[in-house]
Amino acid sequence: MPPSFLAFDFGTRRVGVASGNTLLATATPLNTVQATGDERWRQIARLVAEHRPDALVVGIPYHPDGAAHDNTHRARAFGRQLHGRFRLPVHEVDERYSTTEALAAGARDPDAAAAALILEQFLRALPNPTVVPTPASDDDAAT
């Protein structure tokens, strides 16, 4: 069975979610979690239990010049929480323009579509699509 992933386009009010695997290196938008606090985590836990991914991918936003901002730090914290709650590898992907691309493509659910773009970017960059990669440490560059 090819490695499978859930990807997240983190936002403070909404979190887009997509799933995919390495077989075709494509992703499918699932839905957008529009909850906060414990309810947000309950909905994400249901998706993790349903899809049983081998690893998780989180889009990390940056300014166009590559500088970090408040949401960069929030998204990275979200990724650490995912790892802590689900004990799965978590990979970070630079997602500077994912929502803009999803909107330009006419997505009905731009947050979930952005998560799919994030996951496809990650899948295309895998050196060996049959192996679940080990995430970079906090001291290394993000995957």
Image (cartoon, grey):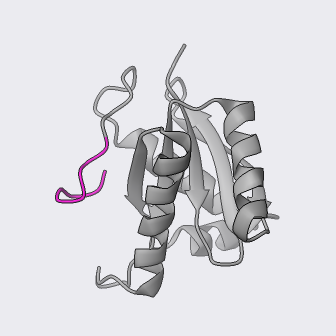
Q: What residue is at 40 percent from the left and 76 percent from the top?
A: 73
Outermost residue, right side: 108
| Residue 81 x/y as whole percent | 50, 58
Q: Is residue 105 visible?
A: no
Q: What residue is at 31 percent from the left and 26 percent from the top?
A: 128
| Residue 82 x/y as whole percent | 53, 52
Q: What residue is at 55 percent from the left and 42 percent from the top?
A: 86
**Left or right of 125: which side holds 105?**
right
Q: Which is more toward the observer, 60 or 75?
A: 75
**Left or right of 85: which side holds 127?**
left
Above/below status of 34 relative to 25: below
Q: Which is more toward the observer, 3 or 83?
A: 83
Q: Which is more toward the observer, 83 or 98?
A: 83
Bounds of the magenta segment: 135-143
Location of the N terminus by quadrant is top right
| Residue 6 x/y as whole percent | 59, 43
